[in-house]
Amino acid sequence: MIIWSVTNQKGGVGKTTTTVSLAGFQALLGKRVLLIDLDPHGSLTTYFFQQTATASDSVYALFRQPAICRKNLLPLIRSAGIKNLFIIPSSPSLAALDGKCSGQRGQGLILTRWLDLAREQFDHVYLDCPPVLGVLMVNALAACNHLVIPVQTEYLAVTGLKRMRETIRMIESSKGIRIAHTIVPTMYDQRTNASVNSLGMMKQSFRRELWDGFIPEDTLFREASFYNKPISHFALTSRGARSYHRLAKDLTRISHAH
């Protein structure tokens, strides 16, 4: 089982779209895929459902009601309505988790322990993270095999990458681990100087971690979300779908190399 965390400390950069799109292509290949929505805003959850879940029926239970999940994760796992694609939904209760977990030991490895229960059930797990450094992001970074960092090709998003890099180094140092990561340029529009220049900045400053492709602007992403489908299941031949398909293949190859 490969665990992917999709995160950035800046919002609006395409995290949920990236999570859904990568998972969709793995599901098309016949892989069993589990999505976990760690963001209190619940964008990943509402992508497939009309609303977020209650505290006891969501990922919140993993952190605050361990007796429910002690033996397995099945009570929390729902079908996403797509073959091979499953989800543990978010709850607004996650927003208060940092305060409730403050000062408690072992809080950064809770997700790692629970995901061990899923190793025989799923081929891939995708963690959609909140854009805030706290117990949820720390858990996601500690649990993952590979970190995917979507970055919108605009100036503020690129400058925010430095903060994300510092966070990775801090967690690597405190946990004694190495976090393999790939930066993915998103929302690229070659007609604008902002996109072209921002992509150039990424190539100059983050060449080693930067994926050599990009995800283009594509209105079909919004249409796919309206129909609660990944782009892979809605518009397979679209520009956006082709780009995410290539990214999925490249990331899988990188993860196997490690």
Image: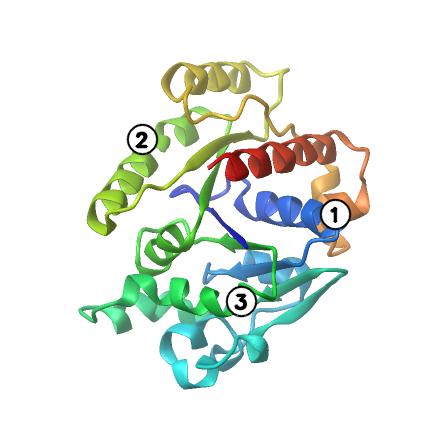
Q: Position of residue 158 (x, y in %)?
A: 41, 27
Q: Which mark is residue 162?
A: 2
Q: Position of residue 27 (x, y in %)?
A: 71, 52
Q: Which residue is mark 3?
A: 118
Q: Nearer the viewer, residue 94 or 236?
A: 236
Q: Nearer the viewer, residue 61 or 219?
A: 61
Residue at the far bottom in the pictured view: 67
Q: Is residue 50 above or below residue 6?
A: below
Q: Dividing the picture into quarters, in which one does residue 10 lie?
A: top left
**Could you tell me how far apart the alpha carbons at marks 3 and 1 are, in whole angstroms?**
19 Å
Local SS, label 1:
loop
Q: Dividing the picture into quarters, in which one does residue 74 lie?
A: bottom right
Q: Earlier in the sequence, mark 3 or mark 2?
A: 3
**Could you tell me how far apart the alpha carbons at marks 3 and 2 are, in whole angstroms?**
33 Å
Instruction: Judge the density around disc 3: few (<14), some (14-19), many (≥20) Cα neighbours within 10 Å.
Output: some
Q: Nearer the viewer, residue 8 or 253?
A: 253
Classify residue 85 as left or right of residue 255: right
**Could you tell me how far apart the alpha carbons at marks 2 and 1 are, in whole angstroms?**
35 Å
Q: Position of residue 38 (x, y in %)?
A: 46, 60
Q: Quadrant of the N terminus?
A: bottom right
Q: Which residue is mark 1?
A: 29
